[in-house]
Image (spheres, grey):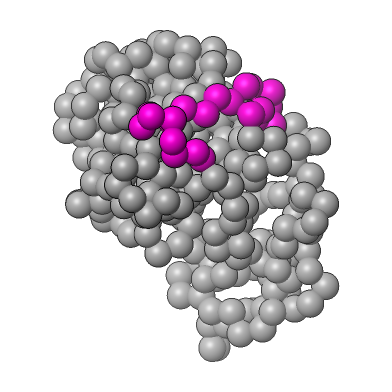
Amino acid sequence: KFYKCASVDTSTKTWSGYELVYNEAGYYELSDVITENLTYSGMTPVEGSIYNEDATLRIDRYSKNPDLIPEEGLVFYASLNGDTPTVAETGQVLTEVNYDANQWQLKYGSEDGIPCAIFADAYYGTDSAWSGLTFDASTLPQGAEPRTISMWVKTYNNNITSFFAYGNYSSGNTFQLQYHTNYKTINFSCHGDDVHSVNSFDFSDRLHHLAVVLNGNTNHDITMYFDGVRQDMTVVTDRNINTSGNICKIGCGATNGYGRFDGWLSSIRVYDRV
């Protein structure tokens, strides 16, 4: 949940705010009712700004209807709210792929009050389930062009789970974002285990915001953010970034089936800028 800060009490480290709610018309608006006794420990809320309920993430801006107001540099946006499951808000055609005998369909619902797509085991409760989305990635940044990818994620199961991948599966050509549930690390790969977070995280408790930024031409130029906080990264293998290939996959890795995603995804955005 997110709130626009109405007041702060620094002596008790509590704050109050107007909740950002998703209404029946299909967009977000601010509630008229103030929620009291929200708490914070790190970031101190500022009146008028919007934060998640424990103030670990701030939203710099929001739109009542983001589908109608273009964001600077936005080249792909899929809300995954189920209203238009075959077309992204930026126009790309989304094709559902069911990798196990076409029997496990992608589902849509909400998690933690946020509309989202429900992948595989998270809905069916079986390790046999396996589904994903693909689209033509020709509009996404190629080569070593700057880019930012962000999304909301909650995991359910599986050891290595891929959220988002595009490009050919060969050295330097892949751009892939993963999570390793055994080590609890966020991984970036352009072919193999290239970069991972120093710290570990639990994606299974609730939806978390994840972002990856490329500003350079090697995997040393990758920056990751977890719930708005920049993470220290470890480079396992030095690689140049040269993303190529026009197929993007949501909910599995660059190769069919590898790193299938089990969990919930919402509001995937790709920008051609940092």
Frontmost residue, 182 versus 63: 182
**Res. 237 image quadrant:** top left
| The quadrant where residue 111 appears | bottom right
Residue 120, placed above or below residue 85: below
The magenta stretch spans residue 98: yes
Q: Residue at x 63, y 22 (%)?
A: 92
On the image, the x and y values in percent for residue 142 come to 46, 14
Dividing the picture into quadrants, the one containing residue 189 is top left
Name the foreground residue: 70 vs 11. 70
| Magenta-span inclusion, residue 213 | no
Q: Visible in this render: residue 146?
A: no
Main secondary structure of the magenta stretch: loop
Query: In the figure, 59 relative to 35: above or below?
Result: above
Q: Residue furthest bottom?
A: 12
Can you say whether 40 is above or below 77 in the image? Answer: below
Q: Position of residue 12 (x, y in %)?
A: 54, 88
Is residue 157 toward the left or the right of residue 92 in the image? left
Quick one: which residue is furthest to the left in this view?
236
Give the number of marks: 0
The structure residue drawn at horizontal position 26% and vertical position 41%, both measured from the top left corner, is 160
Question: Is residue 225 depicted above or below 91 in this figure?
Answer: below
Q: Residue at x 79, y 45 (%)?
A: 65
| Side of 175 where 158 appears, left or right | left
Residues in magenta, as a range: 86-106
Q: Quadrant of the N terminus?
A: bottom right
- Residue at horizontal 70%, vertical 41%? 83
Question: Could you tell me residue 143's position as x and y percent?
Answer: 42, 12
Relative horizontal placement of residue 248, taking residue 258 as reference (left or right):
right
**Coordinates of residue 20 in the picture (x, y in percent):** 71, 62
Q: Is residue 183 visible?
A: yes
